[in-house]
DNA sequence: TATGAATGAGTATTCATTCAT
DNA sequence: TATGAATGAATACTCATTCAT
């Protein structure tokens, strides 16, 4: 009866295992379309066991988004920026952000897709977005002060940088995100005319 | 139970009415969480009637995305571009695209959220994205040829322009999309120093 | 599939049928120990159908006690008393009350046994008891005024008359209730000494 | 988890503790609606422990009714009667019976409510009722022989005396049982006119 | 002895779908 | 065409019971 997966898991490990199975199932099918039975099967346990660890399917969802918070990793992505020039940093940030979205694709899909029906999940999503906006915004502001970037509303840049990356990873999945090209465009702008004419026009 | 108003409805109008009700319900709760009864109630008819018009819940979903195609409107958004300068056009496109996302929010949410589970819906979404990419890409290429924009992969610009707008409308719902500011940043780039100095600095 | 029991029942008849089946099951096993499946089987329908007619098992319970109210019959039992002498009336009332408890045994068991967990059911029980107490009390008071019965708290007599009968029917089920003997004892009292000594003692 | 206090408990004390907890839970919610876990929680132990002491939930029920037998106390209630006059004794018996029902309310509710589904429990109830009927019947017979009470079927008097009291305590819970008034009515009878006039009137 | 993780059959309830009217 | 009663499989959740520790 005990499959190699069960390996005498202590309560904590078992909980982790259930959370991981739930995350996968929720991400793959969406919360509403996921069955407790499917989660239990994915974890290799009997259906009833889930209720030893979580009060309800909803509670399991909340436990999942809490357990697999993106906040630490999202902070790390921005942390390396420090006060290095945007030229170097933004490409790096975009690439690492892109990697994060891939590695944590299951959670991201869950937050994005099922958040709108579940206020608590929505709150986690918004908090994560707000945090990355704040941190990256602070960095950008510093670069403006340092004279590297021209003055502007930094939240817009955060969105301009991350939304295109997120769009690809959240759904289209296809071609690599071409982070460097995106950053190059962002920094230099689209216009062909020499920069000094743009500003003096 | 059937009011004189309902009786007037020919088969086509009734079908339209059911599709509209289904769209609203699917968008509000997601496909999986929506009930045939809810749709029927929203349309003010009995549950069984839906099966006179659609073979199944799934078939209804497909009929909805087919009926409410975004393609015509998406084409119109780009159509006005013609060969006018990007300076004028891009802000206009972004703003109209933003309006479109708002006006057709129900369909957009449906395509985006439930597409990944339903290949046919997914195909519609991808087709729509591909079309807007193609059309806007052609315009951008023309502006590069015209010397207004510098040479680059135009799909990236399409994404840089539309992804930030879509992000806001698909989920965060909050602040207006600030299309003009976004376009201004995109055109001019983030860097403060004149372009000819950048490389030598 | 259509058994002779199903006989194209209209919605109202079907509802009645379900209520009757539910009453029997609840009375036989108690509310908590009764299964929706059992009720459906007793009515010869599929389990899900119950939810067309009743929102929940609890709602079904309430509908049952409401539908099969004892009030009309309880009133009839007392109604015949009018202003005839207690000598004649009390035995009659006891006997008819006894018959009522037998005929409506299922409902009575349900009210008595499951009422304490279900406030709404409890209320019905208490209301019924209060009504019979009031009506029979009024009669007894009239007999006191008429000089047939000696002055006393009439509620006590109601209880003295009906509790012994109810006790047998609610549980012991065995020997007939010997209503006449009970009434004889009640009227004449237990004491052996002549009545005129009792009063003058 | 096991506090020093629990450790002290020998097997017998622990058994007692579990029986007491079970009695409370069964009385409060009924057998069917009571959970093993609730009983364990009420006793402050883990769910599995109950199965070291009792083979099943059903076995636990039987052990409860056996352990908390009313027989000794029921005998005591009647014991004091001896050969004293009914005038003194009956009120006393009713009052003590009433007190007994209150003190042992949990068991009484359990016997009464869940007995009908569990033959063994039912047997205990009937045995108890039979015993009180026998003992009190013997006393009443003695009083008839002594000339205090008039000849009649004494079981009826037992029921007339105890059923009204039991009715109040088993359910209505409200006003005190007014034992003395009940006994007074019982002894003296309801009729106003002297007994020797009744038949000739 | 005592725990509590684990099971799996069972329960109330939902819901897509069918079909007689 | 339109209704809504009816089905039955599926779903979330419960709970008596077992068992390794």
Image: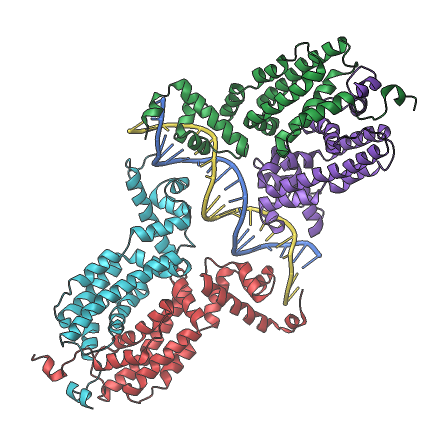
Chain colours: A cyan, B red, C purple, D green, E blue, F yellow
Residue at image coords 36%, 42%: A53
Q: Quadrant of residue D120?
A: top right
Q: Nearer the viewer, residue B117 or C177?
A: C177
Q: Quadrant of residue D190?
A: top right
Residue D32 visible in image: no
Looking at the image, which residue sits at the far left?
A: B200
Q: Nearer the viewer, residue D98 or C181?
A: D98
Q: Is residue A36 left or right of residue D143?
A: left
Q: Is residue A148 left or right of residue B187?
A: left
Q: Nearer the viewer, residue D191 or B81?
A: D191
Q: Nearer the viewer, residue A161 or D150?
A: D150
Residue D169 visible in image: yes
- When the figure is inspected, residue F1 is found, relative to residue D95, above or below; the finding is below
Residue at image coords 35%, 46%: A42
> At which x and y percent is residue D166?
65, 27
Looking at the image, which residue sits at the far front?
A: C200
Q: Is residue A31 left or right of residue B150?
A: right
Residue at image coords 58%, 60%: B47
Looking at the image, which residue sits at the far right?
A: D200
- Which quadrant: the N terminus of chain B? bottom right
> At which x and y percent is residue E16?
52, 56
> At which x and y percent is residue A168?
29, 67
């Amino acid at each position: 009866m005990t499959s190699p997966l069960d390996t005498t898991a202590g309560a904590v490990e078992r909980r982790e295992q259930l959370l991981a199975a739930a995350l996968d199932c929720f991400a793959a099918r969406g919360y509403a379309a996921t069955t407790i039975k499917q989660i239990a099967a994915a974890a290799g346990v009997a259906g009833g066991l889930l209720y030893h660890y979580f009060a309800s399917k909803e509670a399991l969802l909340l436990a999942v988004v809490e357990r697999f918070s993106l906040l630490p990793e999202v902070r790390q992505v921005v942390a390396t920026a420090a006060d290095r020039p945007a030229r170097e940093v933004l490409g790096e940030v975009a690439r690492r952000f892109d990697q994060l979205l891939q590695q944590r694709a299951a959670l991201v899909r869950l937050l994005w897709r099922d958040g709108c029906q579940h206020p608590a999940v929505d709150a986690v999503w918004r908090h994560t977005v707000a945090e990355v906006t704040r941190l990256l915004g602070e960095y950008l502001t510093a670069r403006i002060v340092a004279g590297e970037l021209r003055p502007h509303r930094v939240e817009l840049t955060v969105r301009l940088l991350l939304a295109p990356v997120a769009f690809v990873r959240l759904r289209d999945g296809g071609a690599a995100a071409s982070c460097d090209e995106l950053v190059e465009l962002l920094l230099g702008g689209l216009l062909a005319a020499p920069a000094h004419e743009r500003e003096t026009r």
